[in-house]
Image (cartoon, rainbow, N blue to C red):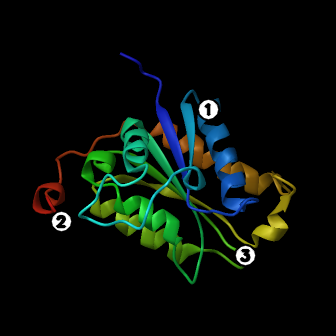
């Protein structure tokens, strides 16, 4: 049995020079340095049509769900748009359910052009909890992103450490299991 935790980071930004993607690379480096195998799931590389419950395996949905299901820990990274998380990430999460997230540890990362993107993280936390994921209390934010980076690298080592810590903490809690089991997954079957 392989004891190496596997961490998947899902990038909810479609921008070519995405600060979210740059941040996720740092978080994944923290996970890898702590002993995890890593995978950056870049939504730009997948064909994910707008979710339609009548076609839950459309496009590359099976690849998306396979990669997330394989993970012991998932980092969801998003830019903040109008106080919430991005539409591409929402669409990707709509293709997922309990099979992908139940009892999976999840770390949250949000990036904003302005101040702290806390509401985006609150919204993601609610979605993950509804899927019976175990969401880390520790979360990472990158405010004023255009000033936070020098090229692809963080300009501030303290901010880089905070983002890297998200990856390290996710590995630390990658195999946590709730006790007792919650009732939500049985109550929401077929939702």
Residue appearing at x 62%, y 41% in the figure: 28
Residue appearing at x 72%, y 53% in the figure: 22
184 to the left or right of 48: left
Q: In the rendered view of the protein, which quadrant contains the C terminus? A: bottom left
* Residue 32: mark in rendering: 1
**Disc 2 designates what residue?**
191
Residue 152: image location, x then y, percent: 82, 52
Q: Reading the chain from its start, which is encountered first: label 1 or label 2?
A: 1
In the rendered image, which quarter is residue 97 located in?
Answer: bottom left
Secondary element at tag 3: loop
Question: What is the crowding at mark 2: few (fewer than 14 residues within 10 Å), some, or many (at least 20)?
Answer: few
In the foreground, 170 or 146: 146
Foreground tag (1 vs 2): 2
Foreground tag (2 vs 3): 2
Residue 128: image location, x then y, percent: 36, 60
In the rendered image, which quarter is residue 126 located in?
Answer: bottom left
């Amino acid at each position: 049995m392989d004891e190496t935790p596997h961490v998947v980071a899902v990038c909810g930004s479609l921008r070519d020079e995405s600060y979210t993607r740059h941040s996720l690379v740092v978080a994944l480096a923290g996970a890898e340095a702590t002993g995890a195998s890593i995978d950056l799931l870049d939504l730009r590389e997948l064909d994910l049509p707008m979710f339609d419950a009548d076609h839950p395996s459309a496009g590359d949905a099976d690849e998306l769900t396979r990669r997330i299901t394989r993970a012991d820990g998932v980092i969801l990274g998003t830019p903040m748009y109008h106080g919430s998380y991005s539409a591409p990430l929402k669409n990707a999460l709509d293709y997922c359910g309990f099979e992908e997230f139940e009892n999976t540890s999840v770390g949250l990362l949000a990036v904003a052009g302005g101040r702290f993107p806390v509401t985006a993280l609150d919204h993601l936390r609610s979605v993950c909890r509804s899927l019976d994921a175990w969401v880390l209390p520790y979360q990472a934010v990158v405010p004023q992103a255009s000033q936070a980076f020098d090229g692809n690298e963080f300009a501030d080592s303290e901010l880089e450490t905070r983002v890297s810590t998200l990856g390290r903490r996710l590995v630390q809690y990658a195999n946590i299991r709730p006790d007792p089991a919650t009732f939500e997954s049985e109550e929401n079957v077929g939702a």
